[in-house]
Image (cartoon, grey):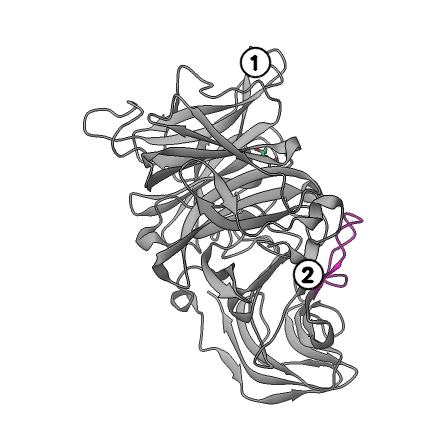
Amino acid sequence: METLATNNAAATDIYRPALHYTARDTWLNDPNGLIFHGGVYHLYYQNNPLGNVWGNMSWGHATSTDLLTWTEHPVAIPCDENEDIFSGSMVYDRDNTSGFGAGSVAPLVAIYTSAFKPGSQHEGIQAQSLAYSLDGGYTWTKHADNPVLDRGSADFRDPKVIRYDGSEGSYWVMVAVEAKDFKVVLYKSEDLKIWEFLSTFGPANATGGIWECPDLFPLPVDGDPENAKWVLTVNLNPGGPNRGSAGQYFVGDFDGTSFISRSTMTSGLNGADLRGDYQWLDWGRDYYAAVSFNDAPDNRRLMIGWMNNWEYANHIPTTPWRSPMTLAREVSLQTIDGNPSLVQQPAGDWTALAAQEPFSLAETTINDGEQVLPGAAGTVQRIDVSLAPGSAKEFGLVLRGDGAKGTRVGIRPDEGQLFIDRRESGETDFHESFPSLDTAPVRSTSGSYDLSIVVDRCSVEVFAQGGQVTMTELIFPAENSTHLGVFAVGGTATINNLHVTQMA
Ligand code: FRU
């Protein structure tokens, strides 16, 4: 197996994250083919092997054993003169249903969208195709009879294939999108080659942009395996809660044929703006095309998103690489206000990578204004903080600050809002839509607000109230903006406790 580079070792540029995947010197977008196989997590992704803007779409490849540090490998499935290799997924075909296996070796099978190029036999069409690997995912052969599923559509893409084992039997199920119709289409197959139409889902809830990159998986509600619900996720662009690209989800049932949502808001379809009522995967500007791993250990459901937004994706000021992936997140279903809702936690063993004992504060008052916390500075850190309101209208943390400016993550208790304000986060003028103050609804039943925040050179990921609400955003601070501070506006607030762990 040839290894190109470990992204961390190559981290010489100031924006290159340490704990998020970036390609060494090329462009990436959507995570593809996420699978745990052979003891490693495989992350394939939309990659331009020849540049750092979107184009020449191929599947890049990286692996990890801890979900925090990644190793880049050579391009897995390159584009050619006939097709771009758009997003898709991967299964381990352990019973060799596809016949791609050899001897005792069962194949990994990638199901991807062929975006056919001008001049090719299927010009203008997007259809689903297969490639297989017999060496654990490092080298790939395209199926001779591609595409295997063609609806004659120009916008049929992003197949996610799962193994369904339920009351209706055992078979492969594909969810893909008719992007411009706001529809998820479902198919089944015995052999990954012949696909039978099952049903469609949508339009439903947010339809502000085209629908892309769906996923479908079961999860126990409140950890009870006797009470499982199905989650259908679908990304949309634009139309996110704070502009641009974002992902929404539906909770319901899947009977082997159809997905029945229990979380569709009916009035939204009449034109009412129900953004606040939809279920979003993330409220920040930079969490898109999120999909989950197949075959993750212990039935865990782990998701990764692309940490960027199509509004300005090609313009973010990084070089020679462009775009990080988000952290891997473990998702689960928790009943909140009577409704099963997705709750997310950063995955991986954070203590193993901690560089030193955490910086900690016990109960401390935050006075009006901003106070830098001596000893807590850093550029790659995990912050766990519990905050309680006082007389201040808003309060919170200043990340990657210089004493005057920085990125603010705060709470407006009267408005029930969590926010990220990146208007003074550093470099913001590369695109007019980048500087922003973005909000998410957040509630406190205990009176406190618990935030876990991961800062990684060019990014901030906030997991609020035990992961009930998440916000993910890119930032591009100056190299010497390393202060961590706290702030309150128009009064005081309280830090119940604070732990800052510098990451190696
Ligand atoms: C989502 C997306 C997918 C498509 C891929 C192309 O970001 O537009 O729908 O397969 O990117 O790179």
Residue 108 located left or right of residue 285: left
Residue 176 is situated, as x and y percent measured from the top left of the image, at 52, 33
Residue nearest the observer in this picture, 199 or 232 = 199
Residue 337 is situated, as x and y percent measured from the top left of the image, at 55, 67
Q: Is residue 425 magenta?
A: yes
Judge the density around disc 1: few (<14), some (14-19), many (≥20) Cα neighbours within 10 Å. Answer: some
Decide: is 182 above or below 8: above
Residue nearest the observer in this picture, 454 or 150 = 150
Q: Amino acid at mark 1?
A: His
> CB of mark 2 within 8 Å of CB of mark 1?
no
Q: Is residue 191 magenta?
A: no
Residue nearest the observer in this picture, 37 or 211 = 211
Q: Residue furthest left?
A: 104
Location of residue 102 by image quarter:
top left
Location of residue 488 by image quarter:
bottom right
Q: Is residue 239 visible?
A: no
Q: Which mark is residue 477?
A: 2
- Magenta region, residue range: 420-439
Sequence-wise first label, 2 or 1: 1
Q: Is residue 64 visible?
A: yes
- Principal secondary structure, stretch drawn in magenta: loop
Q: Which residue in the protein does label 1 denote?
A: 122
Q: Amino acid at mark 2?
A: Pro
Dot 2: what SS?
Answer: loop
Residue 22 is situated, as x and y percent measured from the top left of the image, at 53, 47
Location of residue 174 by image quarter:
top left
Q: Residue at x 60, y 21 (%)?
A: 153
Classify the position of ligand 1 by quadrant: top left, top right, bottom left or bottom right: top right
Residue nearest the observer in this picture, 318 or 174 = 174
Residue 397 located left or right of residue 88: right
Residue 200 located left or right of residue 441: left
- Structural distance between the alpha carbons of marks 2 and 1: 46 Å
